[in-house]
Image: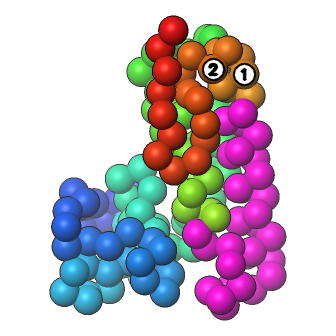
Amino acid sequence: MQRASQRAPEMDDEMLPIGKQEGEARTGAGKLLGCHRETCEATAICFLEGQFLCLTHFISHCYERLEECRRAPFRETSAAQAEADLRFLRECSERAANLVPPVRGLPNLERARLFDILLWASELLAKRCAENEGKTCVNSGPGATKRRD
């Protein structure tokens, strides 16, 4: 849940995504952003699915969504849900990859969880693309392109 007093702002030129900072989400003015989960006072480290999240909530959110994606076969979801899942899998992979490098100073347990998230998201994305015979996605990296045959 998001804090009632602090809704996720729209991303704009003043907000810098993870990878541009040392693992902390900041506005262009340099102000640190807090995690948008209710009762959490931790500093946000990334922006995922419209929310700024701390490391703990990023990991838990990713595991929840990855489990949802695993349980819902690609062919049994609506086109809108399938596209939202693909967008999440790409974004999740990218965010986890940005957080894994040792220069971030994260403990090994958190890094292991991030690697697990990265691998699981990549695996689900590859399966989704293979099941759809590549018609929805061509690659899974940043800037992935779509092909409609």
| SS label for mark 1 | helix
Residue plotted at (47% across, 14% down):
148
Q: How is the image coloured?
A: rainbow
Distance of mark 1 from mark 2, alpha carbons? 6 Å
- Is residue 32 rendered to the left or right of residue 113? left
Residue 144 versus residue 124: which sits nearer the camera?
144
Residue 140 versus residue 31: which sits nearer the camera?
140
Which kind of residue does numbered mark 2 sit on? Gly
| SS label for mark 2 | loop
* Quarter-of-image position of residue 139: top right
State the predominant SS element of the stretch in magenta.
helix
Work out whether 77 lies above or below 37. above
Residue 78 percent across, percent down from the top left? 48, 14
Residue 109 percent across, percent down from the top left? 80, 77
Say whether residue 105 is magenta: yes
- Is residue 22 rendered to the left or right of residue 32? right
Residue plotted at (32% across, 86% down):
32
Kindly identify which numbered label has been placed on residue 130. 1
The answer to whether one can see residue 72 in this image is no
- Looking at the image, do the residues carrying marks 1 and 2 touch, with CB atoms under 8 Å apart? yes
Residue plotted at (73% across, 75% down):
110
* Quarter-of-image position of residue 24: bottom left
Magenta residue span: 98-126
Work out whether 78 lies above or below 5. above
The answer to whether one can see residue 28 in this image is yes
Say whether residue 107 is magenta: yes
* Quarter-of-image position of residue 36: bottom left
